[in-house]
Amino acid sequence: MSDLLRLLGDGRFHSGEELGAALGVSRSAVWKCLQRLEAEYGIAFFKVPGKGYRLAEPLSLLSQEACSVALRRFGWQLYFRDSLDSTNAEALRLLQSGAATPFVVLAEGQTGGRGRRGRVWASPYAQNLYYTLALKVANGPQGLSGLSLVVGLAVLHALRRAGVGGAGLKWPNDVYAGGRKIAGILLELTGDPADVCHVIVGIGINVNMGPDSVDVGQPWASVRGEVGAVADRNELAVFVSESLHQYLGRHAREGFSSLRAEWEANNIWQGKRCTLSTGTRQVKGTMVGIDEQGALRLLVDGQGEQRFSGGELSLRLDHDS
């Protein structure tokens, strides 16, 4: 399917006969593939008798070669997939099969993308960035301290390079633009967190997704919406890789405390009234920042400052803030 989309990526009309000849299949096979792309992946086409087929909107497809070249500079292996359940799940399977870290899994689309707390991550085909980095952490709690916040800084830096100037961070691991979510991070561990373990760093970024692509269930932003043009997903994948290499390297050398001030400088909810959901209760207070391990510092009503950390916590802005 990606080969067919690449042929149509020039924005011109192509006849079924021309497409079939280029792909080595029949016109009927081309028609069936186009139907599948529309029905299963939501990719729209113009169909004009005598002219052929053209994409209704331009697409930025990923280039396995270009991304591989960029990753080789860091000694990272690329595993590229057209479509899969989720890049995090694929990274776990690769680890279990003995794949050497660090490596990156990139996909054009996901059928079972996941966010934090079991939420579904919208993953329309060839629209967004579905990216997972797997790496080994050998220094236990010190190597894991504040890691998701460091990844957030890396993603923020990459988005700003891509032209999203108004982006900021929401604790613990979301990136917002214009008050709406543009990227999310899901970290999963395998092994012994107190000793040697592998960390699966899942990153989802809304890149070219349009308002009618999917029902996300919350306000969201995209790179395309922020910059006003279709974004190059390959360029953004390279930006993310370069930023991760830079920020994770600094984290490994200096610890999270060296990045705490930068994170707080980009905290969009600093000083705002928030509600923290812990799973069993809700805590209301004012966000006053994070500590040197990345834990949330919340000025709780009537109880003074308290600190919270954990993967099942969720922070929401109060409507009267």
Image: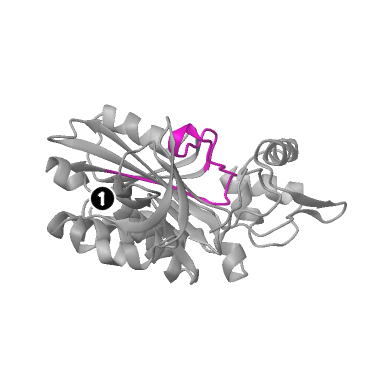
Magenta-tinted stretch: 109-134
Q: In this picture, is 253 found above or below 77?
A: below
Of residues 43 and 182, the one drawn nearer to the viewer in this rendering: 182
Does residue 132 show up magenta in the picture?
yes
The quarter in which the N terminus is drawn is top right
Q: Is residue 145 left or right of residue 153?
A: left
Amino acid type, callout 1: Gly
Question: Is residue 292 something one can see in this rendering?
Answer: yes
Q: Reply yes or no: does residue 153 show up in magenta.
A: no
Examine the rendered structure and indicate whether residue 70 appears above or below residue 21: below
User: Residue 96 at x, y = what percent?
Assistant: 27, 27
Name the residue: 47% across, 32% down. 118
Question: Residue pushed farthest front?
Answer: 302
Residue 244: horizontal and vertical position, in percent?
A: 30, 57
In the structure shown, which secondary structural element does the residue marked by tag 1 occupy? Answer: loop
Q: Which residue is mark 1?
A: 146
Which one is in front, 40 or 299? 299
Task: Please name whichever residue, 53 or 321, is drawn nearer the observer in this view of the structure.
Answer: 321
User: Could one spot residue 69 in this view of the protein?
Assistant: no
| Res 175 → quadrant | bottom left
Q: Point out residue 177 in the picture as x, y percentages from the top left corner.
A: 52, 62
43 relative position to 146: left or right: right
Tally the numbered discs: 1
Mark 1, other Cα within 10 Å: few <14 / some 14–19 / many ≥20: many
